[in-house]
Image (cartoon, grey):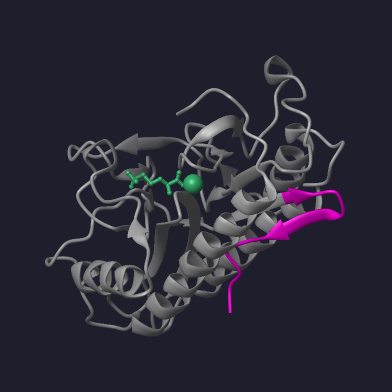
């Protein structure tokens, strides 16, 4: 992760719009393929083909050795689940799909949690509130605010529903690198202070990871897959946001 906050030029803003749009469209498309019986490997192959067909590069593929173009995290998997022929979606599952595409040297990064068939009411609610958490944070992404304003809005909303907020993984600046400064946590504490001040030309990925039970996580033996320690479901929702003088611009728009 580069440790410099980058301010994008107008032409770089345009490239980020293109990358963000393709990332959002790829997730819309993957959402149409999420069905009982589909394997997560099939979703990965479809995403890679879609990104390449539209002139993008899948940014996750080979990123620090990651072996696929999307992350597919099912039920108690929070993030970074690796697509597999052996994992087929079942009625009642939820699946978080995280996707990134590069166009003209700039990155888009976004994630959605999709429902498979008949999902339990309390899990549907978790998915809905996780999206709401993102939008609570989004509203705070205005010039002059600080990172902590986004974090606090997300944390307050999640905790008002009794959910856990994952702390080991955070959102991030984004641009020519997928992960740039600053870190964008979904929680607050005194040690972190206010975080960076938001300025026009900054781009950030805001990505609440919210758990139905305890916020404690563990990482599976594959070295990637993050799961809840208590085995209860988790949801993830992410978009790339550009800070403009008039407020936040959503670059990875959902349909
Ligand atoms: N998109 C993830 C993030 O939000 C990163 C994916 S890690 C990868 O930061 F290795 F899969 F690329
Ligand atoms: Co991200």
Rendered position, 177 above or below 138: above
What is the residue that sits farthest to the front in this orientation?
11
* Image quadrant in which the C terminus is located: bottom right
Magenta span of residues:
243-255
In depth, the one of 234 and 39 nearer the eye is 39
Q: Residue at x 52, y 33 (%)?
A: 180
Which residue occupies the foreground of this view, 57 or 210?
A: 57
Q: Is residue 229 above or below residue 86?
A: above
**244 with respect to 80 (left or right):** right
- The residue that appears at 39% across and 44% down in the rendered structure is 230
Specify the quadrant of the image occupied by residue 33: bottom left
Is 56 in front, or is 136?
56
Question: How far from the left and from the top, in percent, is residue 162?
Answer: 65, 49
Q: Position of residue 193 (x, y in %)?
A: 75, 19
Residue ID at (38%, 76%)? 30
Instruction: Report if residue 172 lies within the magenta region.
Output: no
Residue 62 visible in the picture? yes
Residue 88: where, in percent of width, then height?
A: 20, 72
Number of disc labels: 0
Residue 74 makes an appearance in the image: no
Relative image position of residue 239 (x, y in whole percent) = 58, 57
Q: Residue at x 84, y 37 (%)?
A: 145
Residue 153 picture quarter: top right
């Amino acid at each position: 992760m580069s440790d410099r906050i980058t301010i994008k030029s107008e032409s770089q803003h345009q490239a980020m719009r293109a990358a963000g749009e393709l990332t959002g469209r790829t997730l819309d498309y993957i959402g149409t393929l999420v069905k009982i019986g589909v394997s997560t490997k099939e979703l990965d192959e479809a995403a890679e083909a879609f990104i390449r067909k539209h002139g993008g590069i899948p940014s996750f593929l080979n990123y620090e050795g990651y072996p696929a173009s999307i992350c597919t995290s099912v039920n108690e998997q929070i993030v970074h689940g690796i697509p597999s022929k052996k994992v087929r979606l079942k009625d009642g599952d939820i699946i978080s799909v995280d996707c990134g595409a590069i166009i003209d040297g700039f990155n888009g990064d976004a994630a959605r949690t999709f429902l498979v068939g008949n999902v339990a009411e309390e899990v549907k609610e978790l998915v809905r509130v996780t999206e709401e958490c993102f939008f609570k944070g989004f509203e705070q992404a205005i010039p002059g605010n600080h990172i902590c304003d986004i974090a606090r809005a997300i944390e307050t909303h999640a905790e008002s529903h009794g959910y856990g907020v994952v702390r080991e993984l955070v959102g991030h600046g984004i641009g020519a690198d997928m992960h740039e400064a600053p870190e964008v946590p979904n929680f607050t504490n005194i040690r972190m202070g206010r975080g960076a001040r938001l300025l026009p030309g900054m781009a950030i990925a805001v990505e609440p990871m919210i758990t139905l039970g305890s916020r404690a996580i563990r990482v599976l033996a594959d070295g990637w897959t993050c799961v809840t320690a208590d085995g209860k479901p988790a949801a993830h929702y992410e978009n790339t946001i550009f800070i403009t003088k008039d407020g936040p611009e959503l670059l990875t728009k959902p349909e």
